[in-house]
Image (cartoon, rainbow, N blue to C red):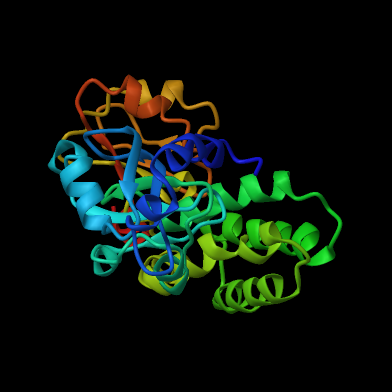
Amino acid sequence: MNNVETFANIPVILLKGAEWFTSIGTEKSKGTKVFALAGKINNVGLIEVPMGITLREIIYEIGGGIKGGKKFKAVQTGGPSGGCLTEKHLDTPIDYESLTAAGSMMGSGGMIVLDEDDCMVSVAKFYLDFIVEESCGKCAPCRIGNKRLYETLERICDGKGTEEDLEKLYNLSNVIKDTSLCGLGQTSPNPVLSTLNNFYDEYKEHVFDKKCRSGKCKNLLYYVIDDENCVGCMACVRVCPVNAITGAKKQTHYIHQDKCIKCGACMQKCQFDAISLKSDYRISVES
């Protein structure tokens, strides 16, 4: 009885009766639900919808679709310990049982829409960072386990992940889920497990190809000089704080990836659009 939404429901139930309230929704999830609709969507804000409405109806009818005409990628429901659901889940009815079965939850009523420009590994890391800070520390699975999960995700986003890290994410997530004492710990691996299950190809790209297709993981982005546009003006050489750029005057310059700290100073200084960001390590090396 300490949830604000519960208090908000009480007056109308008293006025119209329990039968009226239970006539809304599904067999096991009655009434309405308030969601905080946010993310890459045209209409953001608080919405109240009947239980049983689908994710598709919320995102495309109430939310007005994806902002900027971008492609829908995922929707994260339930707050920080909720899961990320994909296009195949869009016709899932919004109720407690269906969301849990899909790998997410109703939770605090958060609903964040993600588009094609979002990195799902980075998204999982973002939520684990919050969970690590919020853990009360009473039980080791949540206190230590989630910290290890975060560190593993950080390694993967930094381009230092291994095949063993992928297996560790699965195994440790399930241990935390099964052995934590409270609801936070038991649901905390949801961001990891749901993204592993639904976006495993992105994890593999981060680990094996050292590539972030969305360009969100800074350490998997590479500044590259285009031979065609570079005039050898030396401007980028002079501005680089770690001497990662070499090349004689009026000759094509080269960025040494092992020295580059990815500060972006060179690209800002270049007046000839000769420096660009690449998300594929192999392309960068060949350049």
- Which residue is drawn at the image coordinates 70% and 50% (left, top)? 132
Q: Is residue 197 visible in the rendered structure shown here?
A: yes
Image location (x, y in percent) of residue 60: 17, 48
The answer to which image quadrant residue 91 occupies is: bottom left
Q: Residue furthest right?
A: 138
Q: Is residue 186 left or right of residue 30?
A: right
Residue 166 horizontal side relative to residue 168, left or right: left
Front in this rendered view, residue 31 or 66: 31
For this rendering, which residue is in front, 97 or 144? 97
**Residue 20 horizontal/vertical position (percent):** 35, 51
- Whole-percent x, y for residue 186 in the image: 67, 66
Q: How many numbered dots are placed on residues in this image? A: 0
> Quadrant where the N terminus lies?
top right
Left or right: where does residue 260 sit relative to residue 115? right
The residue nearer to you, when weighing 38 against 168, is 38
Q: Residue at x 47, y 27 (%)?
A: 240
User: Is 249 left, or right, of 167 in this rendering?
Assistant: left
Which residue occupies 63% across, 45% down?
130
Q: Quadrant of residue 267?
A: top left
Q: In which image quadrant can residue 177 be found? A: bottom right
Against 199, residue 22 (above or below) is: above
Query: Residue 78, how many percent across, how many down?
Result: 49, 52
Q: Inspect this view and state whether residue 65 appears.
A: no
Q: Residue at x 35, y 56 (%)?
A: 51
